[in-house]
Amino acid sequence: MLLLQHIKVCGFPRSRFHLLALPRLSAHGPAWSSQWGHPQLCSHVCGGPSAQRDHLGRGAARGWIHHRHDRQMASWAPWLLSPQLSWNPERACYVDVALPLYENLTIVEQPVNLSSLAQKYAEKATQFIQHASASGRPFLLYVGLAHMHVPLSVTRPSAGPPGRRLYAAGLREMDSLVGQIKDKVDRTAKGNTFLWFTGDNGPWAQKCELAGSMGPYTGLWQTRQGGSPAKQTTWEGGHRVPALAYWPGRIPVNVTSTALLSVLDIFPTVVALAQASLPPDRHFDGLDASEVLFGRLQTGHRVLFHPNSGAAGEYGGLQTVRLEQYKAFYVTGGAKACDGSVGPEQHHELPLIFNLEDDVAEGVPLERGGTEYQAVLPMVRKVLADVLQDVSEDNVSSADYTQDPSVAPCCNPYQIACRCQTV
């Protein structure tokens, strides 16, 4: 099993289950993970050894984690930094953090060298596949790519305008990295290895030419209000991402599915393919997508819920409902656009409802007095009430890693932010 995905990790709540916490999977064979973490607005950077242990199954897996590199803007300055981390809202970065690269629980670089990180990923991943295949046991490899996130650090920029040169070179580098991993699988375990590639969000519009493209998912209604309908929003351009699945002999080739799936489905799908069982004491928003992947079904989710992720409304609040081809917005607002504008936050007691089959650009909502709107609205309200009730009864807990000194990612235990090498 090989997963290639962008994801943000920062230590799980104690009640959270992950793949390696399931006995059948943890007993199967070796597991290796590379990830990029997500620093919080606090006096430390999360995702260090203790958080990593909890995420990877308390030592059950081996791998790398490096802290989120879009916050690393000042990390190449050749001086020791203040022990207090500071947040610069104008530059949207932490100016005092030299972000580290961990191998298991050991810092191997601080600051991490972004220009050589992709090749390190490829080398470690292919070595792992070789050793795991030679052992004859099932394996799980998770590669959380740093691409295509800013800063775009590549060794060979392309021809063309500076921003587009970097973006094109970054895409080629990611393609090469994924290709190296796929080639290794094809040479060692092609017939019984499943590869799943996907992303975590749409382009970060405020980064302009470094952000990429939303394609046809342009969020025209929001664009007219102001701000960006891309990353940090619940418009299609903010969270619709590419997904590719590869398993020769099992997954049909050159097929595009219209089924509505989510990264939430990775966990239950992998569990099902491993013939394991999900914990029975909680509800899972994801579904087993294997029948869709194998081409036997064209139906996925009937309903998905999209929480706010920073553009407007309460952070984490369920403000958008996807019901079949319909999408209902209770809160709208644009993220920061390339020109610096931010769309106004608007609350809709009667939600905006779009029919995505007819309007993927989300340009014209259904007329509130129309027959189609009146037919869809009660169903939207019902599924939203059901999920809010389910959330209120969920089995949840919290974890506070702030008091654990090993969480501070630094090879000098007396400094919250430090450098382990001379630049």
Image (cartoon, grey):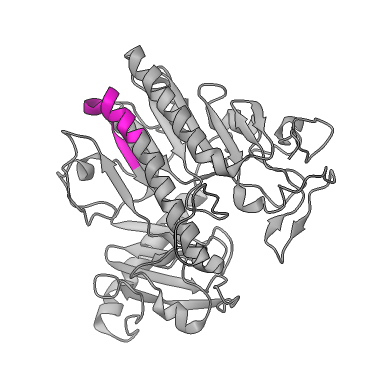
Q: Residue furthest top?
A: 135
Q: Is residue 364 left or right of residue 160?
A: left
From the viewer's side, name the closer residue of 155 and 350.
155
Question: The C terminus appears in which quarter of the rendering?
Answer: top right
**Residue 185 is inside the magenta segment:** yes
Residue at horizontal 52%, vertical 62%?
308
Residue at horizontal 60%, vertical 75%?
340
Query: Which x, y percent locates residue 6?
Result: 46, 46
| One can see residue 47 in this view | yes
Q: From which residue to which does the magenta span run?
A: 181-196
Query: Which x, y percent locates residue 47?
Result: 63, 38
User: Eyeballing the image, is 8 above or below 323?
Assistant: above
From the viewer's side, name the closer residue of 393 and 85.
85
Number of on-image labels: 0
Quarter-of-image position of residue 413: top right
Residue at horizontal 75%, vertical 53%?
95
Q: Is residue 241 left or right of residue 96?
A: left
Q: Of helix, strand and loop, which mostly describes the magenta segment? A: helix
Q: Is residue 88 left or right of residue 306?
A: right
Q: Residue furthest front?
A: 159
From the viewer's side, name the closer residue of 343 and 268.
343
Query: Which x, y percent locates residue 121?
Result: 48, 34
Query: Which x, y percent locates residue 194?
Result: 28, 33
Q: Is residue 358 left or right of residue 423?
A: left
User: Eyeballing the image, is 242 above or below 133?
Assistant: below
**Residue 210 is inside the magenta segment:** no
